[in-house]
Image (cartoon, grey):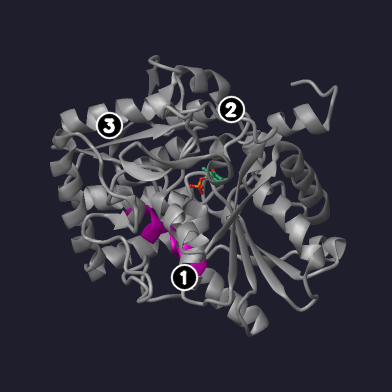
C-alpha cells in the first residue's frame, strides 16, 4: 500500500487550504475568539503528527489490523449486466469496522488527540454513525468519550445510542432548539471552549472551521489511494468516472482526492434530493442553496432570503444536513467536481436493486450514489470504468427501508 497512512502532500494544482484555511472563497474559521487558540493548537499538532513517521506507522497498523484495510474494490458483475453500459466497481467501505467510512476519520483524530496528550474526547452525532465510530476509537485507545446528540435523534436512533453506551461512551441529550444535529454541534462547541485543556473535539465530516475540513479529508483520502492501486491491479488503467454521495462530504472527497489531478476523470457528488426540491423537502445544498456561513465555515447553505437556515429532509439521515463541506463548494466553483441529486424514491429503488443483484444491502446514503450510477451507466460505453463508493452498509437502515419496500411488515 501507499507509504503514507494518510495524505502528506497537497497535489500541486490544488494549493488549498491556504494559510487562513480558505478554499478560494470558501472555508475559513469564523468562530468566537475563545475558540481560536484551540484551533491553532490543533493546526500545529496536526502538522507535527503528519510529519512523524512513528505516528504514520501506528495509524497504518490500526488501519490494517483493526479497521480491516485495504477494503476491497469489487466488480459488480450482475449490476453491470443489469445496466448494460460501463463496468461498475464498488469501493467497499461498508466492510470497514463499524460498517462505514467514518471510522477512518474517527480513528485518525482520536489517535491525534492521544498524541496531543488529551484525556477526553467529545463528538456530536445526528444519526449516530459518527458517534459510534468515535466511541469505538475511544474504547480502542482508552480515552473517555462524551457524545452530544439531540433528544429527538436519541429517540429515532435507539440502536446506535445503545451501541455507544455498550462501548463505554456517555450519550449527552441536547434539548435545545430543534433537538437535532445542529443543536448538538452547538453544545459540543460550547463544551470544547470550556474544556479545551484536556479535551479534543472529533468533528465527523469535512466541515466546520479550519483545520477540521483538512484533517478529515486527509484521513479519508486513503479510500482513493487504495482505489487507484486496486483498479490498476484489476484493470490496468484508471477509471473514467467516480461517483459518491455527499452529506458533509467526507466519503466523496476521500474517494476523489487522489484523482483530482487526473483531469480526464469525471467526478460526481450526489446529494439528497428528498421528496422534491421545494424548501424543507431535500438536502441538495448546491441545487437549492446559496453561499453562506454555518458552523464556522463559508460554504453552500440551505437558507431563506433572510439567511435563516431552512429545514431539510432525506430518507437517509446521514445526508440530511443544511450545509456541505467548503472544499466541495470550491471544487464546484472551478468545475472540477460535478454535483447532482437523487430523490428518496430513486435511492430506495437502488437500495432494492443492489440488495437483490449483488447480495449487498447498502446504506441509504450510499444508495443515492448507486441511484445516479443507474441513471448514467446505461448511456456509457461498455469498456468505460465506473467506481461507486459504497460508503456504508445498510443494516442500520433495514427498518426504514422496509417501511417503503415491504409494506405490511411489522417490527
Ligand atoms: C455519515 C455517512 C455519509 C455522509 O457523510 P459524508 O461526510 O458526506 O461522507 C454517507 N454514507 C454513510 C454510510 C454515512 O454513515
Q: Which residue is drawn at 82% across and 24% down?
A: 409
Asked if the magenta segment contains residue 218, the reply would be yes
Q: Going from the N terminus, do you reach mark 1 or mark 2 first? A: 1
- Which tag is nearer the camera, tag 3 or tag 2? 2
Task: Judge whether 270 appears above or below 273 on screen.
Answer: below
Q: Where is residue 210 shown, x and y percent of the image?
A: 28, 49
Secondary structure under the numbered disc 3 in the rendered image: helix
Which labelled disc corresponds to residue 189?
A: 3
Magenta segment range?
A: 215-224
- Side of 251 relative to 401 (left or right): left
Q: Which residue is drawn at 67% across and 81% down?
A: 235
Q: Gap between marks 3 and 1, in whole Å?
A: 31 Å
Q: Name the residue under label 1.
A: 258
Q: Residue 99 at what x, y percent from top left?
A: 56, 47
Label 1: how many residues lie within 10 Å, few (<14), some (14-19) or many (20+)?
many
Q: Give how far apart the Cα atoms at labels 1 and 2 are.
A: 34 Å
Q: Is residue 398 above or below residue 4?
A: above
Q: Choose the circle earlier in sequence order: 3 or 1.
A: 3
The reply to whether the C-beta atoms of the residues labelled 3 and 2 are less than 8 Å apart is: no
* Label ID, residue 23: none
Q: Gap in Å between the C-alphas at discs 3 and 2?
A: 26 Å
Quadrant position of residue 316? top right
Residue in view at x 36 percent, y 40 percent:
139
Which quadrant, please, contains the C terminus?
A: top right
Please name the residue shown 62% across and 34% down the image.
314
Instruction: Tell which circle, 3 or 2, labels the residue nearer the N-terminal end.
Output: 3
- Dominant secondary structure, magenta: helix
Residue under label 2, please give it.
280
* Secondary structure found at label 1: helix
Amino acid at each position: 500500500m501507499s507509504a503514507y497512512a494518510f495524505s502528506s502532500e497537497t497535489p500541486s494544482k490544488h494549493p488549498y487550504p491556504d494559510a487562513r484555511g480558505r478554499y478560494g472563497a470558501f472555508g475559513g474559521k469564523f468562530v468566537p475568539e475563545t475558540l481560536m487558540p484551540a484551533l491553532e493548537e490543533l493546526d500545529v499538532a496536526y502538522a507535527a503528527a503528519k510529519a512523524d513517521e512513528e505516528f504514520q506507522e501506528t495509524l497504518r497498523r490500526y488501519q490494517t489490523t483493526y479497521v480491516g484495510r485495504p477494503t476491497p474494490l469489487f466488480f459488480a458483475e450482475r449490476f453491470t449486466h443489469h445496466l448494460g453500459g460501463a463496468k461498475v466497481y464498488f469501493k467497499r467501505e461498508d466492510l470497514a469496522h463499524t460498517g462505514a467510512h467514518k471510522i477512518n476519520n474517527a480513528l485518525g483524530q482520536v489517535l491525534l488527540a492521544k498524541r496531543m496528550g488529551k484525556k477526553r474526547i467529545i463528538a456530536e452525532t445526528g444519526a449516530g454513525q459518527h458517534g459510534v465510530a468515535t466511541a469505538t476509537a475511544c474504547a480502542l485507545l482508552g480515552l473517555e468519550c462524551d457524545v452530544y446528540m439531540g433528544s429527538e435523534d436519541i429517540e429515532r436512533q435507539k440502536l446506535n445510542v445503545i451501541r455507544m453506551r455498550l462501548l463505554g461512551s456517555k450519550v449527552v441529550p441536547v434539548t435545545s432548539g430543534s433537538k437535532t444535529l445542529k443543536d448538538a454541534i452547538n453544545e459540543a462547541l460550547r463544551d470544547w471552549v470550556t474544556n479545551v485543556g484536556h479535551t479534543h473535539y472529533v468533528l465527523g465530516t469535512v466541515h466546520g472551521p479550519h483545520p477540521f475540513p483538512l484533517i478529515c479529508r486527509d484521513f479519508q483520502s486513503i479510500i482513493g489511494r487504495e482505489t487507484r492501486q486496486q483498479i490498476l491491479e484489476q484493470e490496468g488503467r484508471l477509471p473514467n468516472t467516480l461517483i459518491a454521495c455527499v452529506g458533509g462530504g467526507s466519503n466523496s472527497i476521500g474517494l476523489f482526492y487522489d484523482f483530482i489531478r487526473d483531469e480526464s476523470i469525471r467526478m460526481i457528488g450526489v446529494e439528497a434530493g428528498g421528496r422534491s426540491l421545494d424548501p424543507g423537502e431535500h438536502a441538495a445544498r448546491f441545487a437549492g442553496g446559496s453561499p453562506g456561513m454555518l458552523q464556522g465555515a463559508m460554504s453552500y447553505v440551505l437558507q431563506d432570503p433572510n439567511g435563516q437556515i431552512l429545514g431539510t429532509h432525506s430518507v437517509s439521515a446521514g445526508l440530511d444536513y443544511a450545509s456541505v463541506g467548503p472544499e466541495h463548494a470550491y471544487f464546484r466553483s472551478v468545475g472540477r467536481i460535478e454535483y447532482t441529486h437523487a430523490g428518496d424514491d430513486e435511492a430506495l429503488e437502488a437500495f432494492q436493486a443492489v440488495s437483490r443483484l449483488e447480495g449487498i444491502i447498502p446504506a441509504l446514503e450510499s444508495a443515492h450514489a448507486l441511484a445516479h450510477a443507474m441513471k448514467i451507466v446505461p448511456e456509457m460505453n461498455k469498456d468505460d470504468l465506473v467506481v461507486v463508493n459504497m460508503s456504508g452498509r445498510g443494516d442500520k437502515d433495514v427498518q426504514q427501508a422496509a417501511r417503503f419496500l415491504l409494506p405490511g411488515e411489522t417490527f
